[in-house]
Amino acid sequence: MKRPFIFLYLWNKITNMLDFLLEIPLFLGILIVVSFLTIFGLIVTTQTKKLLRGKITKQHEKVGRILFRVTAGLIALLISLSYANERVNQSKIIDSIEEETSLIAAVLISLNYIDNPKTKAIETLLDQYVTKTIDDDWKQLAENPYFSEANMTLIEAYRLALEIPASSPQEELQKSIIIKDIHEINKLMQTKIYSPFSQVPYLIYILLIGLFFMWIFFTVYELNFVSLLFLSLYNILIGVLIYFVFMLNNPMIGPMKIEPHSFSILKSKGLDFKLK
């Protein structure tokens, strides 16, 4: 097998393994990542030590220790910044979903000001949309984003809103508010259309390469039970962080996916916003 094809083969294997992590429970996924990094790190370190036995001078040790500390620190810094960035992105999506829920509640209240069969139909469609979201319709969004049942439900609700007859200035105002809010709900739903796809951050590949170099630099130290234990503990920490970065980068799928709690609250409180 030619060298470029070897790299492509390894790249595909790593990508498939990361995609597999999205389908298994949280703790099992952490265990797999941590075990892989720890065992692979020990193998690389011990085998490199055997290859370089008798060839490492005092100068090599000095340079290797500096490079080890710099590489280990850089890896920790990169993954910490990435984790913080993914948490911010996840919070933005949660805020978007909560705003979407608030708009649905506002539309349901506005619909009460116009007594018409079309407003009743819109209420039913919004009820269906909330139910589909709670029932994890985000997976269907990934498979058929623009023609999923949830998306088509909102499109139909928007069409009906445009056809609502208004017999007074007050109803005309409420109609414009309903149309505007449903349009905003549709815009916010695009977040769920673009987020369910599996993504592997390129930073993970950079971190894996950095870890590989770090394990090699570690061979300038004396390898014994305590030193290898310390290295394994570091690998465990980095493995856990890599796992969480990957999961946070896929906010709509996997064991750490965002749950539609605000939709569940809206559903449990009832969607019948009748004016007294």
Image (cartoon, rainbow, N blue to C red):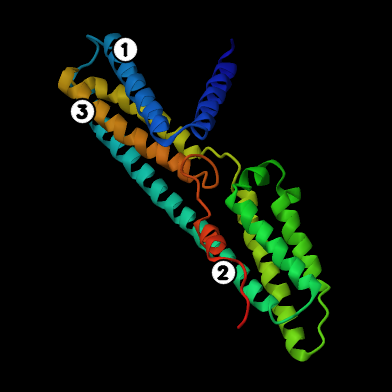
**Residue 176 vertical position relative to residue 3 in the rendered view, above or below:** below
- The residue labelled by disc 3 is 230
In the rendered picture of this protein, how many numbered marks are placed on residues? 3
**Tag 1 secondary structure:** helix
Q: Which residue, as the protein is rendered here, is positioned at the far front?
A: 276
Q: Nearer the viewer, mark 3 or mark 1?
A: 3
Question: Could you give the CA–CA distance between mark 2 and mark 1, rounded to whole angstroms?
Answer: 59 Å
Q: Mark 3 and 1 residues: CB-CB less than 8 Å, in contact? A: no
Which of the two discs, 3 and 2, labels the residue nearer the N terminus? 2
Nearer-the-camera pick, 219 or 43: 43
Q: Amino acid at mark 1?
A: Gln
Q: Amino acid at mark 3?
A: Phe
Q: Where is residue 213 shown, x and y percent of the image?
A: 35, 26
**Residue 136 vertical position relative to residue 8 in the rendered view, above or below:** below
Which of the two discs, 2 and 1, labels the residue nearer the N terminus? 1
Q: Where is residue 142 shown, x and y percent of the image?
A: 65, 43
Instruction: Name the mark on residue 47.
Output: 1
Nearer-the-camera pick, 124 or 154: 124
Q: Residue at x 23, y 15 (%)?
A: 56
- The residue labelled by disc 2 is 102
Which of the two discs, 3 and 1, labels the residue nearer the N terminus? 1
Q: Amino acid at mark 2?
A: Ser
Q: Where is residue 180 shown, x and y percent of the image?
A: 70, 74
Question: Could you give the CA–CA distance between mark 3 and mark 2, rounded to whole angstroms?
Answer: 50 Å
**Dot 2 crowding, Cα within 10 Å, few <14, some 14–19, many 20+:** some
Instruction: Name the mark on residue 5.
Output: none
Q: Is residue 261 visible?
A: yes
Q: Residue at x 74, y 80 (%)?
A: 114
**Dot 3 crowding, Cα within 10 Å, few <14, some 14–19, many 20+:** few
Asked if residue 267 lies left or right of residue 65, the reply is: right
**Tag 3 secondary structure:** helix
Q: Nearer the viewer, mark 3 or mark 2?
A: 2
